[in-house]
Amino acid sequence: MRKNYFINLFKLASLFCVLNLFNLPLKSSSALAAWALKSNGVLELRTKSDAKLKAYFQKANKLYGDRFWVDFKGELSNPRTIKGNGPIKEIRLGKPKRGLTRLVIEFAANKKINPHNWKLIGIDKNNWRIKLAPFPRNSFQTISEGNFLSSNKFKKRSDYFVNFKNNSSLANLPNVKKNKFYVVIDPGHGGPDSGAIGIGGLRETDVVLDVSKIVTNILNKKGVKVKMTRTNEIDLDLRPRVSMANDTNADIFVSIHANASVGKKRNINGLETFYYSGWKGRLLAEKIQKQIVKVSPGSPDRGVRRGSYFVLKQTNMPAALVEIGFVTGRLDGSRLSKDMHRERVAYSIARGILEYLERMG
Ligand code: ZN
C-alpha cells in the first residue's frame, strides 16, 4: 500500500514536470496553473501548492452580468478573455492589481444565479473544485486551459465559502419600509468578560462584536435604525442592555452569542436560537435560526428553544438570543475565526431580522 503510493507519487511528479515543461499555460508567477469549467457546472482549478484562494460573487449591475471570481497570488503574463457559451457569457483572466491573478466567470443576463451555498473545496495541495449553480446537464460546453493531474486519492484539506461583494448581497435582502423600524443589537459579554474561550484562544466577545457590527451595518443600509448595546470591549452588565431597549422603545432586541461546550469538546458544534415568550419572539428566533443554519452546513441545527435568559425575560419587546456556533467546536470554531464566515453569519442574521420585520409590516 505504502510502496504503491510512493510509486504513484513518483510517476505523478515526473509526469507533472514533463507537462510543465511543454505545456505551461500561464506564467509561473501566478498561483493559477490550469482551470476547467466543465459542462456539469463544476469549476476545477489547479494551483501552486498550498495556494491561498479567495472567491467572490457579485450580482449583475449596469456594466456586467452576475460574476463569480477567484483571486490567486501572482501575476499572469497575458490577460485574456475567452468567449463562453450557454449560460456562461465569458471568462476573463486578468490582473486587477499588482501581484494578483483573477479568474472571472461572467454569467449571461437573466440567469438566476444563487451562490449562497457555493463552496470552494481544496481537495489536495494543488487542486480545487467548486460547483457553480445547478445548470441543466450539458447546457454548455466545457471551457478549459491547461492540464489536470488530479490524484485519485481524495483528501479534502479545506473549504472556503464564496464571499459576497457588498452591494450584491444587500440587493438580495428583503426590503422593509425605510426609517420605520428600530432594532437593538446586543453583542454578548465584553471587556473583562470575554465569554467563551475556544480553540486557539478564540474569544466569544471578539467574534460576537464583529458579527454584531456587520449586522448593524447591513440593517442601517436597509433603512433600519439600530443601536448596539456596546461597540467596543467594555464591561456591561445585563441590566443596562435591557434598559437601553426598554427605555428607547425598540421594536426588537437581538442578542448575539457564541457557545462553548463543557470540557471544550471539539466534536460538539451547532447553532441555536432562544426566545422567552410570545409568538413574535418565537417567530423572530425562527427566522434567524433558519438563516444561520443555511450558512453553516454540517453544523447541527439545535433548533429554536425557550430560554429564560435575563435579556429575553426582561425586555418588553420581541427578543431573541442567537448562538452562532461553538467556539470550542472544531468545525464552528475554525469557521468563526474567519472573516468570511463572520460576514456570512452576520448577513444571515440580518436577513432573519429583515424577514421578521417585513412580516410585521
Ligand atoms: Zn455568551
Image (spheres, rainbow, N blue to C red):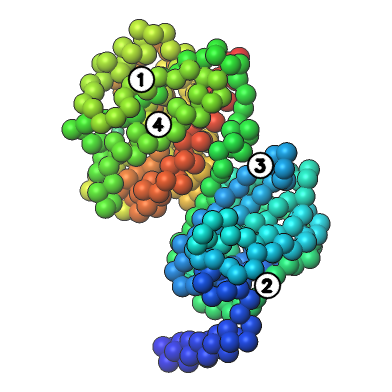
Which of discs 1 and 3 lies nearer the camera? The answer is: 3
Q: Position of residue 111 (x, y in %)?
A: 76, 46
Q: Quadrant of residue 151?
A: bottom right
Q: Is residue 311 above or below residue 273?
A: above
Find numbered disc 4 in the image and state the secondary structure of the residue it sits on: helix
Give the spatial CA distance, label 4 vs label 2. Answer: 42 Å
Mark 1 / mark 3, whichever is N-terminal: 3
Q: Residue at x 25, y 31 (%)?
A: 233
Q: Are marks 2 and 3 in contact (CB under 8 Å)?
A: no
Of the numbered discs in the image, which one, if any, rests on residue 212?
Answer: 4
Check disc 2 and give the amino acid type. Answer: Glu
Give the spatial CA distance, label 1 vs label 3. Answer: 37 Å
Of the numbered discs in the image, which one, if any, rests on residue 312?
Answer: 1
Give the spatial CA distance, label 3 vs label 4. Answer: 24 Å
Q: Are marks 4 and 2 in contact (CB under 8 Å)?
A: no
Q: Position of residue 286 (x, y in %)?
A: 50, 29
Q: Residue at x 44, y 69 (%)?
A: 50
Q: Quadrant of residue 92?
A: bottom right
Q: Is residue 66 above or below residue 323?
A: below
Check disc 3 and give the amino acid type. Answer: Lys
Q: Is residue 80 visible?
A: yes
Q: Nearer the viewer, residue 226 or 189?
A: 226
Q: Position of residue 251 (x, y in %)?
A: 47, 13
Q: Are marks 1 and 3 in contact (CB under 8 Å)?
A: no
Q: Which residue, given by chain and number where applicable, does mark 3 sit on?
A: 59
Mark 1 / mark 4, whichever is N-terminal: 4
Q: Which residue, given by chain and number where applicable, does mark 2 sit on?
A: 145
Q: Residues within 10 Å of mark 3 (few under 14, many from 20)?
A: many
Check disc 4 and give the amino acid type. Answer: Ser
Which of discs 2 and 1 lies nearer the camera? The answer is: 2
